[in-house]
Amino acid sequence: TVALMAHNPETRAYVAKRRAEGLTNKEIRRCLKRYLARRIYRALENSHRIPLVA
């Protein structure tokens, strides 16, 4: 998440928005981690729906 905060343009915009709302870096990192966890979980859930071709 720290690398995303420094290098990813979308994440940098999100961080700027959250800083304007008054959140600390620690709080912003927590939000980003939750977002990433939800994305990973959805990807794992969707991977079970795809039939494996042998």
Image (tube, rainbow, N blue to C red):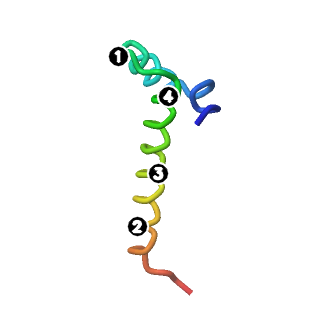
Name the residue: 40% across, 59% down.
42
Q: Amino acid at mark 3?
A: Ala
Which residue has dot 4 on it? 11
Q: Amino acid at mark 2?
A: Glu
Distance Cα–Cα, label 3 vs label 1: 23 Å
Of residues 30 and 32, the one drawn nearer to the viewer in this rendering: 30
Q: Position of residue 38 (x, y in %)?
A: 41, 51
Distance Cα–Cα, label 2 vs label 4: 24 Å
Distance Cα–Cα, label 4 vs label 1: 15 Å
Name the residue: 49% across, 28% down.
11
Q: Position of residue 18 (x, y in %)?
A: 40, 21
Which residue has dot 2 on it? 45
Q: Earlier in the sequence, mark 4 or mark 1?
A: 4
Disc 3 packing (10 Å; few <14; some 14–19; many ≥20): few
CB of mark 4 within 8 Å of CB of mark 1? no
Distance Cα–Cα, label 2 vs label 1: 33 Å
Look at discs 3 and 1 and give the one toward the viewer: 1
Mark 1: secondary structure:
loop
Disc 4 packing (10 Å; few <14; some 14–19; many ≥20): some
Q: Amino acid at mark 4?
A: Thr
Q: Quadrant of residue 54?
A: bottom right
Name the residue: 45% across, 69% down.
47
Mark 4: secondary structure:
helix
Q: Position of residue 48 (x, y in %)?
A: 43, 74
Q: Position of residue 32 (x, y in %)?
A: 47, 37
Distance Cα–Cα, label 2 vs label 3: 12 Å
Q: Earlier in the sequence, mark 3 or mark 1?
A: 1
Q: Earlier in the sequence, mark 2 or mark 1?
A: 1
Please give the label number shown on residue 37. 3
Q: Earlier in the sequence, mark 2 or mark 4?
A: 4
Look at discs 4 and 1 and give the one toward the viewer: 1
Which residue has dot 1 on it? 21
